[in-house]
């Protein structure tokens, strides 16, 4: 079967095989109900432009993606700190990584204040001044 549905009283999951081609990342994102999620965590997809935390284990021996990928927002590694202004965490400190992700999502959701839209004494009508 190319599709399989796993269901219980409280949840369900639809699994679809795509042997002919890898599913497009943008298509997969459309499968979500945006009203029911806070964040999407993605593993892999190195060639797609979205915010990334580079996870790097020295023993694996793979080359760093940073600084060649401008979408990297932080680094989690088991080696010495890099010469970088990016936030850096120990790859084994899951609490620090989780806290970084939560803060990043919170900051992204926060309304961006525009300096020119801010009210000050110079922009308010005299009727508002006492």
Image (tube, rainbow, N blue to C red):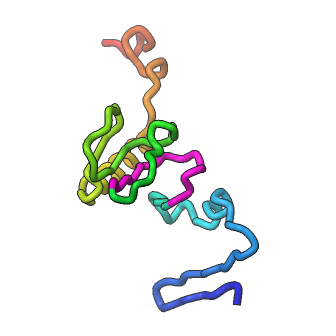
Q: Is 45 placed left or right of 61 in the picture?
A: right
Residue at 25% across / 59% down in the picture?
Answer: 92
Give above or below for 122 relative to 98.
above
Residue at 38% across / 53% down in the picture?
Answer: 55
Residue 60 found in image quarter: bottom left
Q: Nearer the viewer, residue 86 or 34?
A: 86
Residue at 36% across / 52% down in the picture?
Answer: 101
| Furthest-right residue in this view | 20
Q: Is 77 placed left or right of 20 in the picture?
A: left
Residue at 36% across / 46% down in the picture?
Answer: 75
Residue 28 found in image quarter: bottom right
Q: Which of 124 and 110 is in front in this view?
A: 110
Q: Give residue 122's position: percent from left, percent from top.
A: 41, 8
Query: Magenta includes 53?
Result: yes
In this picture, which residue range is highlighted in magenta?
44-58
Most common secondary structure along the magenta stretch: loop
Q: Give residue 6's position: percent from left, percent from top.
A: 55, 89
Give above or below for 13 relative to 112.
below
Q: Give residue 124's position: percent from left, percent from top.
A: 43, 14
Q: Indicate the quadrant containing the C terminus: top left, top right, bottom left or bottom right.
A: top left
- How many numbered dots are placed on residues in this image? 0
Residue 25 found in image quarter: bottom right
Query: Magenta includes 76?
Result: no
Q: Give residue 46's position: percent from left, percent from top.
A: 54, 52
Q: Indicate the quadrant containing the N terminus: top left, top right, bottom left or bottom right.
A: bottom right
Q: Which of 126 and 108 is in front in this view?
A: 108
């Amino acid at each position: 079967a190319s599709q399989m549905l796993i269901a219980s009283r409280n949840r369900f999951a639809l699994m679809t095989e795509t042997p002919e081609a890898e599913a497009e990342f943008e298509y997969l994102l459309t499968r979500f109900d945006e009203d029911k999620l806070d964040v999407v965590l993605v593993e892999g997809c190195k060639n797609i432009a979205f915010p990334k935390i580079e996870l790097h284990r020295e023993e694996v021996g793979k080359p760093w993606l940073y600084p060649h990928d401008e979408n990297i927002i932080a680094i989690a590694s088991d080696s010495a700190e890099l010469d970088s202004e990016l936030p850096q965490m120990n790859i084994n400190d899951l609490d620090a990584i989780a806290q970084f992700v939560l803060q990043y999502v919170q900051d992204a959701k926060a309304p961006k204040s525009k300096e020119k839209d801010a009210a000050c004494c110079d922009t308010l009508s005299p009727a508002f001044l006492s």
